Image (tube, grey):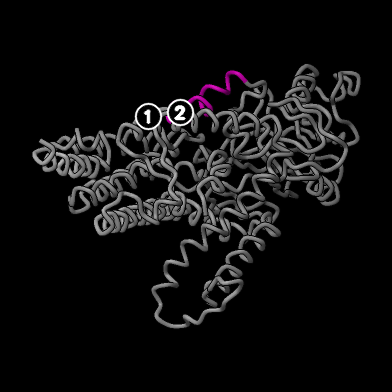
C-alpha cells in the first residue's frame, strides 16, 4: 500500500484541535405553578457565560413563535418579544442575523428551535442565544402549558474529566507504537543493505520521505484543504468519510497482519493466478473491511460507534508513522514549526476574520452550524434537501465524557483530538527512533521524545481546563518534542549528525566504499 492513498486523509486531519463542546440546560417552570419544572438540554453561545446554578437567577417569560424564522424585522413586533425569551424556527438565515433582529426588538433570550443536531451558536451579540430541540419545545408545552418561564444555566463540570485519560493513552500509545515500528523497519533496511551491499531494500517501497520542499508543499496543501472544507463542507465531508473508510481499513490490516504473521499456526495458503495468499490474511482483510463498513454505516451512533472510529483512527496513525519519514531533524523543525503557526492561526486568529466569530478549525472539526440554512461562517446557500452538517469529519479520536448532565434528552458529549496532533509530533518521535537505530544509542532519543510528547499532552489538558476553550495541541506538543530532541542531541554532542539525518553515517560509509576501490586501482593504471 502506497503512502499516496493515505495522504488525502492526512491533509484533512491536520489539525483538528483538542476541544470539548459546551452544553447547558434550560430550566422551564409553569408561571402559575412555579413548583412544576423541567430541564432540557441546550447548546448555548459560548462567547457568553451562563450562571452555574439557579440560585440568584431571574426567569424570563417565554413566547413560542416556531412558525417564524425571524429573518427580517417585519416578522415580529417589538412589544411582542421585548424583555422576553423568544423561540423561533431554525433555517434560511444565519444565527447572527436572527440574533441581531431579536436584539433590536429588545428580546432577552433567543431560542433557536432545531429538528436536527444541536450546534453551538457562537455569535457576537449581547443577548443569550441557544439551540433547543423541537421535540423539547413540544414536550415543554405539553407538560407546562403555554405560560412558561425559562432560565438558562450551565452546571459546573467535574474538575477532571476522565475521558481525557483515555485520549491521553490512545495518543501516547499510537505515537510510541508507530515510532517503534518505524525504527524496527529501519533496522531491517540496514540489515538488508549490509547483506546486499546496496542501500535499496524491499521495505523502502512504501516509504514517503518528506524533504523540506515537500514539507512546505504538505503544509500548504493542508491549509488549502482546511479552507475548502470550510466553504464546501457538505460535499467534501462524504469524500473524506469514504477515504477514511478505505485508508483506515488498509491501515488496520497492515497493523494486525504483523501480529498474525508471528503466530506459527494456520499458515495454509491458496493459489490464484500464480499468486499465493495466506488464508488467515484473507480472513483478516475481510474483518478489517467489515469493521470499516460497519463504522461507515453506523458512524452517527454516538453510544458505540466512537469505539470503532478510535480503533480505525489509531491504526491509521500508527501506519502513517510507519510509512512517512522525515529524513533529518531539519525537516522535523520545518514541519512542526510551520504546522504550529498553521494551527495557531486557524484556531486563534481566524475568529477575527470569520463573520460568525468562530475559528475555521473549530467549525470544520464540529461541522457547519446549520441544516437548511446559511452557515454563519461560509455563507453558502443550502438547498431544500437534507445536507451534511450533521456529519462530522472522522479524522479525530473521540471519547465520550464520562461524567455529564444526567438528563435523558442530552446527547453524548465528546472530548476530541485531531489525528494530526498524533501524527505530526509522532513523525519526530519516529525519526528519533530511526536515529537511535542508526547510531546504536540504546533508544535514548526515542524514549525521551515519547516522554516529552506525553508531557506536552498533559500541558495541553491543563491549558484546556484553565482556558475553557478549544486548544491547538501543537502549541504545546511541538515545543516539548523539539526541545527534548535538541537537548538530547546537544548533551550527547551529536547535533551535527542529528541535524543532517539518520542516513548520515550510511551515506558516509557508502562514499568511503565507493572511493576505496578507485584508490587501489590507481597504481595499476599507472
The total number of labels drawn is 2
Look at mark 1 in the image and give the residue it sits on: 334
The secondary structure type at the circle numbered 1 is helix
Identify the residue at the far top of this view. Answer: 104
Q: Would you identify the image quadrant in which residue 452 lies?
A: top left
Residue receiving disc 2: 216
Labels 2 and 1 touching (C-beta < 8 A)? yes
Tag shown at residue 491: none
Observer-nearest of 95 and 385: 385
**Location of residue 240 in the rendering, given as x and y in whole percent from the top left corner:** 64, 45
Q: Does 157 sit above or below residue 329?
A: below
Taken as a whole, is the magenta stretch helix, strand or loop? helix
Whether residue 487 is situated above or below residue 451 in the rendered picture: above
In the image, is 396 to the left or to the right of 296?
A: left
Residue 356 is a magenta residue: no
Decide if residue 15 is on the left or right side of residue 430.
Answer: right
- Count residues near mark 2 (Cα–Cα under 10 Å), then give few for <14, some for 14-19, many for 20+: some
Are there few (<14), some (14-19), or many (20+) residues within 10 Å of tag 1?
A: some
User: Is 421 in front, or is 204?
Assistant: 204
Image point (64%, 66%), residue name: 290
In the image, taking residue 426 as reference, residue 64 lies left or right, namely right
Q: Magenta region: which residues?
A: 339-353
Amino acid at each position: 500500500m502506497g503512502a499516496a492513498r493515505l495522504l488525502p486523509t492526512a491533509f484533512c486531519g491536520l489539525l483538528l484541535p483538542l476541544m470539548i463542546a459546551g452544553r447547558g440546560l434550560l430550566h422551564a417552570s409553569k408561571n402559575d405553578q412555579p413548583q412544576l419544572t423541567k430541564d432540557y438540554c441546550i447548546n448555548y453561545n459560548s462567547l457568553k457565560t451562563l450562571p452555574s446554578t439557579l440560585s440568584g437567577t431571574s426567569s424570563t417569560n417565554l413566547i413560542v413563535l416556531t412558525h417564524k424564522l425571524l429573518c427580517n424585522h417585519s416578522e415580529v413586533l417589538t412589544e411582542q418579544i421585548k424583555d422576553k425569551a423568544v423561540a423561533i424556527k431554525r433555517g434560511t438565515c444565519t444565527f447572527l442575523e436572527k440574533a441581531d433582529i431579536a436584539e433590536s426588538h429588545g428580546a432577552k433570550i433567543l431560542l433557536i428551535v432545531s429538528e436536527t443536531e444541536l450546534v453551538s451558536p457562537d455569535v457576537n451579540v449581547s443577548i443569550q442565544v441557544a439551540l433547543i430541540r423541537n421535540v423539547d419545545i413540544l414536550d415543554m408545552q405539553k407538560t407546562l402549558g403555554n405560560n412558561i418561564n425559562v432560565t438558562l444555566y450551565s452546571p459546573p463540570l467535574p474538575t477532571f474529566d476522565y475521558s481525557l485519560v483515555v485520549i491521553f493513552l490512545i495518543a501516547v500509545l499510537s505515537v510510541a507504537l508507530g515510532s517503534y515500528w518505524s525504527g524496527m523497519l529501519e533496522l531491517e533496511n540496514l540489515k538488508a543493505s549490509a547483506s546486499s551491499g546496496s542501500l535499496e531494500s524491499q521495505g523502502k517501497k512504501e516509504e514517503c520521505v518528506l524533504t523540506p520542499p515537500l514539507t512546505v508543499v504538505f503544509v500548504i496543501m493542508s491549509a488549502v484543504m482546511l479552507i475548502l472544507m470550510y466553504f464546501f463542507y457538505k460535499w467534501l465531508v462524504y469524500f473524506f468519510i469514504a477515504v477514511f473508510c478505505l485508508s483506515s481499513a488498509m491501515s488496520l490490516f497492515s497493523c494486525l497482519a504483523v501480529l498474525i504473521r508471528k503466530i506459527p499456526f494456520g499458515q495454509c495458503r491458496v493459489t490464484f493466478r500464480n499468486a499465493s495468499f495466506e488464508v488467515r490474511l484473507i480472513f483478516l482483510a475481510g474483518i478489517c473491511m467489515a469493521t470499516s463498513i460497519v463504522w461507515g454505516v453506523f458512524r452517527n451512533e454516538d453510544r458505540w460507534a466512537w469505539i470503532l472510529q478510535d480503533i480505525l483512527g489509531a491504526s491509521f496513525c500508527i501506519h502513517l508513522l510507519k510509512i512517512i519519514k522525515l529524513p533529518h531533524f531539519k525537516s522535523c523543525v520545518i514541519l512542526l514549526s510551520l504546522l504550529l503557526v498553521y494551527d495557531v492561526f486557524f484556531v486563534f486568529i481566524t475568529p477575527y476574520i470569520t463573520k460568525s466569530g468562530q475559528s475555521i478549525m473549530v467549525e470544520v472539526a464540529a461541522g457547519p452550524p446549520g441544516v437548511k440554512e446559511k452557515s454563519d461562517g461560509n455563507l453558502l446557500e443550502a438547498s431544500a434537501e437534507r445536507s451534511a452538517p450533521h456529519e462530522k469529519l472522522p479524522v479525530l479520536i473521540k471519547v465520550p465524557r464520562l461524567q455529564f448532565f444526567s438528563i435523558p434528552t442530552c446527547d453524548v458529549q465528546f472530548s476530541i483530538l485531531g489525528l494530526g496532533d498524533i501524527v505530526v509530533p509522532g513523525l519526530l518521535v519516529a525519526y528519533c527512533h530511526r536515529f537511535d537505530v542508526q547510531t546504536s544509542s540504546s533508544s535514548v532519543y526515542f524514549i525521551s521524545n515519547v516522554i516529552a510528547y506525553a508531557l506536552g499532552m498533559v500541558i495541553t489538558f491543563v491549558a484546556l481546563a484553565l482556558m475553557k476553550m478549544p486548544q491547538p495541541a501543537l502549541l504545546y506538543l511541538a515545543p516539548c518534542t523539539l526541545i527534548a530532541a535538541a537537548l538530547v542531541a546537544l548533551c550527547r554532542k551529536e547535533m551535527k549528525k542529528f541535524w543532517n539525518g539518520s542516513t548520515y553515517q550510511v551515506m558516509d560509509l557508502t562514499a568511503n566504499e565507493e572511493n576505496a576501490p578507485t584508490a587501489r586501482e590507481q597504481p595499476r593504471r599507472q
